[in-house]
Image (cartoon, helix red, strand yellow):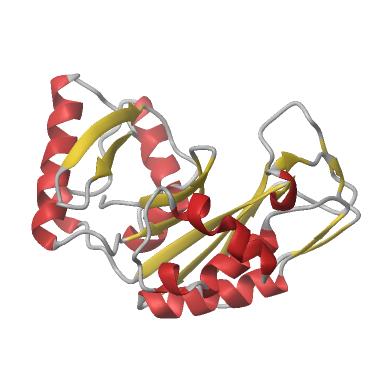
Amino acid sequence: LGERDCSIQRRRQKLVEESPSKALTPTLREEMGRAAVAAAAAAGYVGAGTVEFVLAPDGSFYFIEMNTRIQVEHPVTELVTGVDLVKEQLRVAAGLPLSFAQESIEVSGHAIECRINAEDPERNFLPCPGTTAFLHLPGGPGVRVDTALYTGCEVPPYYDSLVAKVLVHAPTRLEAIRRMRRALEELIIEGYPTNTSLAHLIMHDAEFVRGQYDTGYLDRNLEKLLEL
């Protein structure tokens, strides 16, 4: 079902995910796909899963791990392929066949996800549990928000700080970036700090817009971004 580029991270946890990856050529995409399928087949794996690789500047790639589950960023793949991954996972678990063939999968357009966390980027991403005093979610064409938040919702300190996933889909990567900028401008979560402003700044950063970023992006640019 194609790839997701999850290079923008803090503390080795993903903040922004997109598909398709600007770093991959068609040949490299084919090679990486074959390697992922071979890994799953060698393990006799059945069900939804994601094989993760790290890509070197010279185009070589190396296996990291396989996540044998639905991942947080699965809606990115759903937006570009039109496949409901959760539904297909349940079908497989029930002993039913997939509702599609590999040959029918086509990647259309570009999708981006920003993870919105209850944390303070200016305090080394300190988790910030609290009560959601006010909530306004973005909408419009090509915008999807996955969240359980509501006004008055308590965000406890016992779990991951993720409170929402803001996703966009557009015909091109640049259009998707512009759509995400607008969606983040519409998002309002009051009651505790979030990383919404940081995500918005990333969407305007030249390094990100050019697609010339790697897993060290935030280590290099966080201080600069927070000064803007």
**Can residue 220 be seen in this snapshot?**
yes
Lateral position of residue 212 relative to residue 45, left or right: right
Lateral position of residue 25 relative to residue 211, left or right: left
Q: What residue is rendered at 45% in x and 74% in y?
A: 206
Tell me residue 23's x, y (percent): 25, 60
> From the viewer's perspective, is residue 44 above or below residue 121?
above
Tell me residue 211's x, y (percent): 35, 67
Count numbered badges in the picture: 0
The picture quadrant where one finds residue 108 is: bottom left
Nearer to us in this view, 59 or 85:
59
> From the viewer's perspective, is residue 228 above or below residue 105?
below
Q: What residue is rendered at 79% in x and 30% in y?
A: 157
**Can residue 138 be seen in this snapshot?**
no
Lateral position of residue 28 relative to residue 192, left or right: left
Nearer to us in this view, 176 or 49:
176
Nearer to us in this view, 191 or 104:
191
> From the viewer's perspective, is residue 26 above or below residue 35?
below
Tell me residue 209's x, y (percent): 42, 73
Q: What residue is rendered at 23% in x and 49% in y?
A: 100
Q: Quadrant of the C terminus?
A: bottom right
**Residue projecting furthest to the top:** 43
Q: What residue is rendered at 85% in x and 45% in y?
A: 153
Tell me residue 216's x, y (percent): 43, 49
Nearer to us in this view, 213 or 73:
213
